[in-house]
Image (spheres, helix red, strand yellow):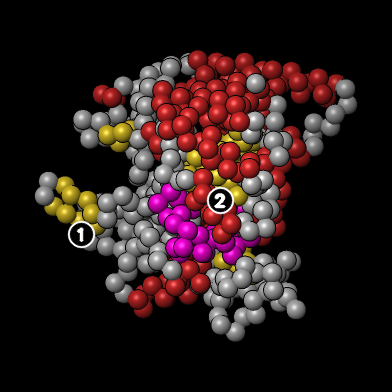
Amino acid sequence: ALPHRMVMSPPKATIEVPLDVAPGWRPDSWRSRKAYQMPEYNDGEKLADAERILARQSPLVFAGECRDLHQELVAATNGQGFLLMGGDCAESFQEFNVNHVRDTFRVILQMALIMTFGGAMPITKIGRMAGQFAKPRSDPYEDRKGVKLPSYRGDIVNGEEFTAEARENDPYRMVAAYHQSSQTLNILRAFATGGYADISRLHAWNLDFVDQTEPGSRYRQMATKVDESMRFMKAIGVDTADARFKQTKFYTAHECLLLPYEQSLTRLDSTTGKWYDCSAHMVWVGERTRQLDAAHLEFVRGIGNPLGVKISDKCTPDELLQLLDVINPTNTPGRVTLITRMNPDKLRKHLPELIRAVQREGRQVLWISDPVHGNTIKTDSGYKTRPFDKIRAELRAFFDVHAEMGSHAGGVHVEMTGEDVTECIGGSVSEILEADLAKRYHTYCDPRLNGMQSLELAFLIADRMRK
Ligand code: PEP
Ligand code: MN
């Protein structure tokens, strides 16, 4: 019999595992596999204590919400929807405030509206928010002028400041990240349902700096058209006071990297008897941690949440099929979103063979594009940046390849912020030059599109969705 209760304490050996759980899986079965990119904590007692504290906290999201998202992703997988994921590369403790959350939320809302209106398709909105803290690093150490310290792995692990003290891994940072995520979700839920997202306010969503710009004026024109459509609908008797016009659904996701954190927030759902990672509605496995027999895929294969996996050009068709065998043996639609991130040329070369393999085997996946992670460069002045042209080119390649292959180009995943930062170079309106990077380079990890660049991208996507 299934235990019909929500387990609030850390999973113990005595808990009955429901029958439909993935064979051999337990919330801690990842611990017997090799875990890449996992921080080492020098005090095991403190780590265990932090995990116990987390396991006592209430879930951040609920299983039913994850299932709602899953339903939307089923529609997108079938070509009847489009997924928009966006947010910071890494959330930070320092930068956290209501306005920061609001601005990112607002730009995602604006992008979604542009895409709904232009692409005539329902847009599922997911913020890289309320848990996007832990970062994989290509080098475990950072060398600054001969001084070598452990790399910064995100505020949930250590501090960004370049001192030995800050760079030490502290398990209690997981507890701080949980509490910040809980506040972020509270803000997001209020904005999504408390009137802020009312479609009749879409003129008011204009960010100040957007007004004078080309995407800004395109946005205003579109907002005027939506207003007219609303008046028309009202005139013919559509109830525009309906919740659909007043509220929006907004989900959260982050990279499933720091497994002690994820395990501690994994709970048994009383309705279905399935385990859900209640740290976010969706979690994804990154490009650096998707090894077939390693810890991260082992962890996610047992949770009921919709899953994402990042896919670079290094992934072969065979490997992709094996990966799908591991995390979706039942071939359930909506379960897996493949997030391709290569660069425009590699994508045109490698994506067709991946799609072909998936089509040949009849696998159910949602294909979305992360057009930013394959296009990161370092300037001579030492800034990590991304050329807007390259991002645009990867998106074009993504839409072209899917059109050729007869598959659904089903969404985008971007690192962006609502703030007027100068982190990615280019953009057709107020172009950001290499010399501008120093002006407002605020990111804690990778360079993000600013609000205006994000809107510009949304118009491009909307144009391609229509074709
Ligand atoms: C990220 O999304 O911030 C990230 C690290 O991506 P990837 O795994 O694709 O490199
Ligand atoms: Mn990133």
**Picture coordinates of residue 306, whole percent (x, y):** 61, 53
> 254 or 396, which lies in front?
396
Residue shown at 68% from the left, 49% from the top:
333
Residue 127 visible in the picture: no
How many numbered discs sit on the rendered protein?
2
Residue 66 visible in the picture: yes
Mark number, residue 321 = 2
Q: Which residue is mark 1?
A: 164
**Picture coordinates of residue 68, whole percent (x, y):** 70, 51
> 359 or 170, which lies in front?
359
Mark 1 / mark 2, whichever is N-terminal: 1
Magenta region: 278-307
Q: Is residue 115 above or below residue 102?
A: above
Residue 406 painted magenta: no
- Report the Cα–Cα distance between label 1 and label 2: 43 Å
Q: Amino acid at mark 2?
A: Leu
Q: Is mark 2 within 8 Å of ligand 1?
A: no
Quadrant (top left/top right/bottom left/bottom right) for the C terminus: top right
> Left or right of 14: which side holds 174?
left
